[in-house]
Image: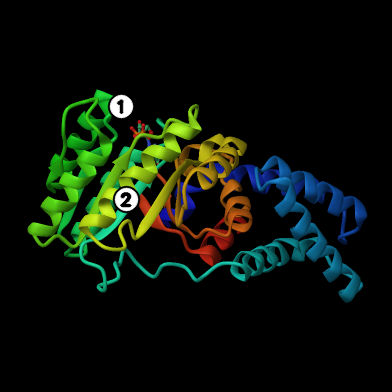
Amino acid sequence: ENLDKGLSKTKESVFKKLGRAVVGKSKVDDEVLDNLEEVLITSDVGVETTLKIIERIEERVARDKYLGVDELNQILKEEIAALLEENNSGDVSDFDLPDTEKPYVIMVVGVNGVGKTTTIGKLAYQFKQAGKKVYLGAADTFRAAAIEQLEIWAKRVDVPIVKQKMGADPASVAYDSLSSAKSNDADVVIIDTAGRLHNKVNLMNELAKIKKVMSRIVPGAPHEVLLILDGSTGQNAFEQAKQFTKATEVTSLALTKLDGTAKGGVVIGISDQFKIPVKYIGIGEKMEHLQIFRRREFVESLFS
Ligand code: GDP
């Protein structure tokens, strides 16, 4: 399956570590639990989330008196899936858009290199496949390459793009994008933005200004602020999520590059800790390599 293949590096690593954690053991005891804690932490699940998971398994061991190590995978799956389902709204069902908002406006944020442009291109492709009229807005005017890369994706997917010159006011590009989209009866507009975290006040001001301008053209816009995080950076992704959620109100997350990494466990920690739905995961460089994040399916895939 696609997801299994995309997560193969993480799966392989988790599988090996779990094997070592229970070697020579028949039941889950304190030593196995200690080892398991280490497995989860070194798989980038994050300390806080790992401790929650261990605590749940401890409770289960106490309750059931005896837990065989051969049941450990199944129990991990159940407990992690339950944990992820607790403080989150449900999974997105599909690359679907609410038809109450037209155009539906997605503002995309994230630092350079995380796969922001690629994810925008992949999303445009999916929405177009779903029969939606898509517009792109190149409001990352800080780097010429950002505009060029987005143009390449616009051509590839065959959707219109609104842009200005490098250095132009991002809010002005956003304004143009929404105006064009609205007058052309678009269903969805995806706006790229520059994510320069090293100057947080500037970032906050810039995003606030873009939002304000957009809401003047389309009331309620942006309807979604999608933060892109690079899953292969493990704990850095946590750090960026912290920073961005301080700079603006992030409403959804996408984790990219899970195919090339053994750090896929990061999705579990981020999903648990930020209480912001992880909507999409990137598992390759091609157009089709963006998937809806389905918690049960993800956990099932990692521990099977
Ligand atoms: P940006 O600077 O954030 O806009 O990043 P780009 O979209 O240009 O992506 C940076 C690099 O990561 C490019 O080489 C992309 O092909 C690659 N990339 C993006 N998403 C994925 C993914 O899900 N898997 C893999 N393997 N590569 C990805």
Q: Position of residue 21 (x, y in %)?
A: 80, 47
Location of residue 74 in the rendering, given as x and y in whole percent from the top left corner: 69, 66
Q: Residues within 10 Å of mark 2 (few under 14, many from 20)?
A: some
Q: In percent of the image, x 24 and y 25: which residue is there?
A: 167
SS at badge 1: loop
**What residue lies at 54% left-to-right and 45% top-to-bottom?**
246
Q: Earlier in the sequence, mark 1 or mark 2?
A: 1
Image vertical order of residue 242 relative to residue 219, above or below: above
Seen from the viewer's position, the closer of residues 262 and 190 is: 190
Left or right: residue 154 versus residue 122 is: left
| Closer to the eye: label 1 or 2 | 2
Number of callouts in the render?
2
Name the residue: 75% across, 62% down.
72
The numbered mark at residue 52 is none
Disc 2 secondary structure class: helix
Residue 255 in percent (x, y) is at 47, 47
* Amino acid at dot 2: Lys
Asked whether, in this view, residue 22 is left or right of residue 128, the answer is right
Residue 6 visible in this rendered orientation of the protein: yes
Which quadrant holds residue 228? top left
Which residue is under mark 1? 142
Work out how far the residue at label 1 is from the one at label 2, CA to CA, in angstroms: 20 Å
Question: Mark 1 Cα within 10 Å, few/some/many (few <14, many 20+)?
Answer: some
Name the residue carrying label 2.
Answer: 212
Q: Is residue 286 left or right of residue 86?
A: left
Residue 259 in percent (x, y) is at: 46, 42
Q: Quadrant of the C terminus?
A: bottom right
Residue 286 appears in the rendering = no
Three-letter amino acid code at disc 1?
Phe
Is residue 101 or residue 263 the one in the foreground? 101
Locate the N terminus by quadrant: bottom left
**70, 142: nearer the viewer:** 142
